[in-house]
Structure formats: C-alpha cells, structure tokens
Amino acid sequence: MTTYPDVVTNTWPLSRGTVPEREAFAFGATLLFVLFAGDAFPNTLTWFGAAAVWALVAAWGVTILVRAKPPLVRTPWALWFFLAWCLVSVAWSHWRPATLASIAAQVICAAMAFAIASTLTWRRILDAMSLAFRWVLMGSLLFEAVVAVVVRHPIVPVWTDYGDRDIPDAFYFSRAELLTGGRIQGLPGNANLLAMVALLAAIAIALQFAEGRMSRNRAVGWLVVAGGVLVLTRSSTVLAAALVVAAALFVALWIRRVPTEQRTPRYLLALVGAVVVGVGAFAARGTVSELLGKGADATGRGDIWQRVLELIGQHPVVGWGWIGYWWPDIPTLADLAHRKGVTYLQAHDAYLDVWMQTGIIGLVLFALYVVTTLDRSWSSATRIGYDAAGSPRSFDPVSLLPLLVVVALLVQSVAESRLLYQGNWVLFALIAIKSRIVLVSEEPRSAGDGPRTPPARREWRLPAVR
C-alpha cells in the first residue's frame, strides 16, 4: 500500500513546480466564474471584449501550468483519446476551419482544468466552486434587480440593434421579469443555465457546511438564495437533475454504511430500483413533460433530435467533423433547428451531438470518458479511505463532491449539449482529471486547506456515516 505524508503542500501529488496556493485558488474561482457567467461578457463587452477576457484567463492558466510542471501520467487517457479523435476528424470535416478552431478551444479548456486539478486539493476545489457559483448567483440577482427596478424593460446584448422589430424572448439578455413572475436569466442570459449554477452552488455550499467550512447562518442564507434562483428560473431539466442528485446522494450514503464485502445485496436492490424508475420515467415522459409545461416533445427537442439523427444517418461511423457549439454561419447546422423564430445551435443532447460530429467511434470514446469518470466519482463517494498509518479514515463529506456534480452534469447533458463546451466541459474535465490523480479518501490533508470547525462544535451535524 502506498504511504502518503500526513500534511502536504497544495501541489501534491502531481505538480513538481511551485505555484502559490492563493494564486491557484484565485485562478480556479476566476475561471469558473468567467465560464459559468456565460453570455454576461459578450453581452456587455461585445464578442471582442469577451475574447480578450477569455484570452487573459487562458494565458494566466498557461503560466500556472508552466510553473507547476504537472506530468500527464496520472490523467484520464480516455479524455485525451477523445480529443485526439476530434482532431483527426479535421481530415474529413465538412467545416474544417471551424473544426480546427473548436478543437483548439477544447484543448485549451481541458488544459485549464488540468491546471486547477494539479495545483489544488479537493477541498480547495470545493471552495473555488462555491465562491465562483455564489458570485454568479448574487451577480445575477443584482443584475435582474437593476433591470426590473431601474431600466424597467427588457434589454438586448450591447452588440445588437433590432430597431423596432418584434424579436423572440430568447434574444434578450434580460426580460425584466424579476418582479413579474417570469423566468429570470441572470448573467448567463439563459434561465436553464442559471438554474444549473444554482444547483451546483447548492451542492457546494451544503458540502462546505457539512464539512465545517461554512457556518450555519451563512450556509442557510446561501442555500435560500440558491433555492430562490431555482424557483425563479423554473427549469424542468435542472429539477430532474436535482431529483437524480438527491437519489444518488441517498444511495451512496446507504451503500457506504455497510462494509465493502457486504454491499452486493444493496447494489442489486439499487440497480433494480434504478431500472424500475428509469422505465417508469421513460413510459411517462410525455405526461411528465406536459405537466412541466414543456410539451410532449420537451419544447421542440424531439424535432431537433430527429433532424440530428438524419444527419447522423449520412455519416454514422466518422461523423461530419468536430465543431462543439454549432457555428451560425454554417448552413448545414444553422438551418437545422428552428423554433418560434429562434435558431438553436446545438442538438440539445450531448451524445447525439458527439455522434453527429465524430461518428460512432467518437461516441464510444466519449462514452468511455464519461463512464470512467462516473465510476471514479462513485468510488470517491463510497470507498473507505486509509491514513498514513493504515487506519480507516472517518467519512468526509467532500468525498461526495465528484459524484453529485458529475450526476448533475450528466442529467443535464441529456437535454442540453453544454457538457461539450464552456463551463460544463471544464468542470467535468476537472473532476475527471482530479479523480484520476487522487480520490478524496486517499488525499492527505493539505497545509493550504484552511481551518475547519471541529466536528463536536458543528451545528446540524450529519448522522454518523462509516
């Protein structure tokens, strides 16, 4: 068995160079905020201004990688194989310039995730996520309040000029609906994306509180904010994600309560339950969608999926070429998905998007990447860790972070393609890389993790979990 030190620096066990822990944390929080704020930067700074911001953050991440000197040996090869296949697709891509530009952005984003994973411990990653998502939530509420109280009418991105034309609601940066009962869009400019930030924030805040890294009053206050945003956005996709996350949390804690050698019956029972729920949800998908106000085909997604499947049928093995988020000036894609005057530039399903762009080969590689990451996340939540002396370590709530975040992102990926780019891509890659480096239960305490409230003094303590 490998023996680890009792207390380590923030760069253990991957980085060979030295990067100040404060800088690594600041970069992680800044990167996640910039990516999950979504359209806030292009909508206010124009695309040129947003590109400058993204380039500066990327340059910062590159300097961290250069100084940290992390090796690739303990990183998920499934991720690199998938990216390599996306690059190979340039050879037959029907939109070669877009493929080259998109794969460059994809690799840079993966490198940024690598920079965070190799310089921060799991606990500091949790802290960075919590801080970034709380910034997005509070900034979104302040933004919507200003628009609703001061501006008092919907606003569009600064780089647009629609004149007196009637435009679809989706084109607005904010519809000024904070006080009217409508769905708010916040900094991301999209209600569904803002709702996902609220769910991820709630996960991070709850784990910080459970571990003693946030006081009760602060945690309750921020959870109320996150819950309020979820109500104001009314996203059925994120509601489904929240339910699955809660189920995953229950099952993980239930499995963990028994020794490893006695878990088989519980795994079988959980599997049967998952199959029953899955079959029932599939059978009632139309009814559930109607109840949520999405229509029988999930707000037009069925039509989009059908058209994407038609493209897949033309090049099922190697695909049309990688592009990630669809470029609006490519006719094949720009003319594919229209609804109520809006052109949607994604398949609204990450797996159909991967299949269409990279063929069945790319889909298999992507599925391998997803499944192995989910497997390591499950191990993080259920495996019993040992300290340097070989004694079992007590349960640490942070060990649930990879599983809960991965589950949330994967549920969203069924109805949105966000897993393939921007914040979701970076966050998933961060967890994939970090969980390959070290699981939470195997990571030594770090000198940079900061103080925690002693378990005996924590309010609302969790029940004992082995």
Image: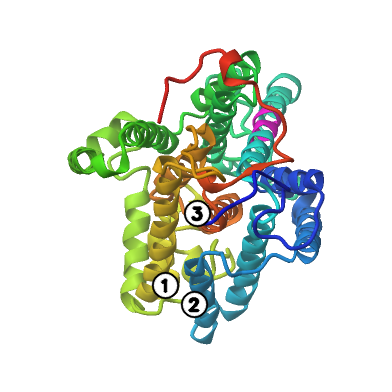
Q: Is residue 465 magenta?
A: no
Q: Secondary structure at mark 1?
A: helix
Instruction: Report which residue position mark 3 lands on.
Output: 419
- State yes or no: discs 2 and 1 in contact (Cβ < 8 Å): yes
Magenta stretch: dominant secondary structure: helix
Q: Residue placed at 65% from the left, 71% from the top?
A: 104
For marks 2 and 3, give the CA distance: 17 Å
Whether residue 263 is situated above or below residue 203 in the rendered picture: below
Please state the horizontal and vertical placement of residue 257, each as a whole percent of the image.
34, 31
Q: Amino acid at mark 2?
A: Trp
Q: Secondary structure at mark 2?
A: helix
Q: Residue placed at 78% from the left, 66% from the top?
A: 66
Whether residue 262 is situated above or below residue 212 in the rendered picture: below
Q: Amino acid at mark 3?
A: Leu
Q: Amino acid at mark 1?
A: Gly
Regarding residue 344, the answer to whether it shows in the image is no
Regarding residue 373, the answer to whether it shows in the image is yes
Please state the horizontal and vertical placement of residue 371, each as a whole percent of the image.
38, 58
Instruction: Report which residue position mark 1 lands on.
Output: 362
Closer to the chain start, of discs 2 and 1, is: 2
Instruction: Report which residue position mark 2 lands on.
Output: 85
